[in-house]
Amino acid sequence: MKEYSFEKLECWQHARRLAVWTYQATENFPEKEKYGLISQMRRAAISVASNIAEGSSRKTAKDQAHFSTIAYGSSIELLNQLIITNDLDYISNQLYDQGRELVERQTVLISGLRASQK
C-alpha cells in the first residue's frame, strides 16, 4: 500500500492524534451540544489534519503555506472551544490541560512546517 507524503509528516501525525483525542473528549458532552460545540470542535480538529494533508499535495511552497495557515487557524479555533467547554464544566481541568498541551504542540509543529514552506 502506498504511503503518501503527508503521512510521513510529524505535523500531520500529531494532528491525527489531536482529532482522535477531540472525538474522545467530546463523547460525553451533553446531548444538547450535539450540533453545537461537539460538531464545531470535531470539525475544527479534522480541519487541522485535512489542511495539512491537502497542503502537502500542492505544487508551490506558497500554496502549501496557505493550507498550513488554515490548519493553524483551525488549531486556534479548537483551543478557543476547549477553553469555553472548560468554562462550562463539560470537561475536567485535567482533560482541559491535556487538550491544551496537544493544541500548543500542534501550533508549534504547524509553525515549523509553515516556516519550511516559505
Image (cartoon, rainbow, N blue to C red):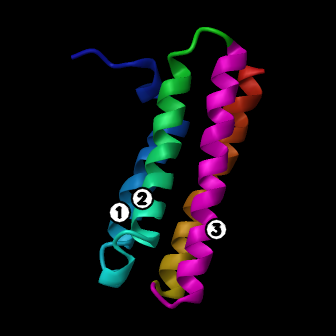
Residue indicated by mark 1 = 23
Q: Closest to the observer: 9 or 52? A: 52
Q: Is residue 18 left or right of residue 65?
A: left
Can residue 117 be seen from the camera position used here?
yes
Q: Amino acid at mark 1?
A: Tyr
- Quadrant the N terminus occupies: top left
Q: Which residues are magenta?
A: 61-90
Image location (x, y in percent) of residue 40: 47, 62
Q: Is residue 19 left or right of residue 75?
A: left
Residue indicated by mark 2 = 42
Can residue 106 be seen from the camera position used here?
no
Marks 3,2: beta carbons within 8 A: no
Q: Is residue 35 magenta?
A: no
Q: Say which residue appears at 69% left-offset and 37% top-offset.
A: 69
Marks 1,3: beta carbons within 8 A: no
Q: Amino acid at mark 2?
A: Arg
Marks 2,1: beta carbons within 8 A: yes
Q: CA distance from mark 3 to mark 2?
A: 13 Å
Q: CA distance from mark 1 to mark 3?
A: 16 Å
Q: Secondary structure at mark 3?
A: helix
Image location (x, y in percent) of residue 103: 59, 58
- Quadrant the C terminus occupies: top right
Q: Main secondary structure of the magenta part?
A: helix
Farthest-out residue, top:
59
Q: Secondary structure at mark 2?
A: helix
Residue indicated by mark 3 = 80
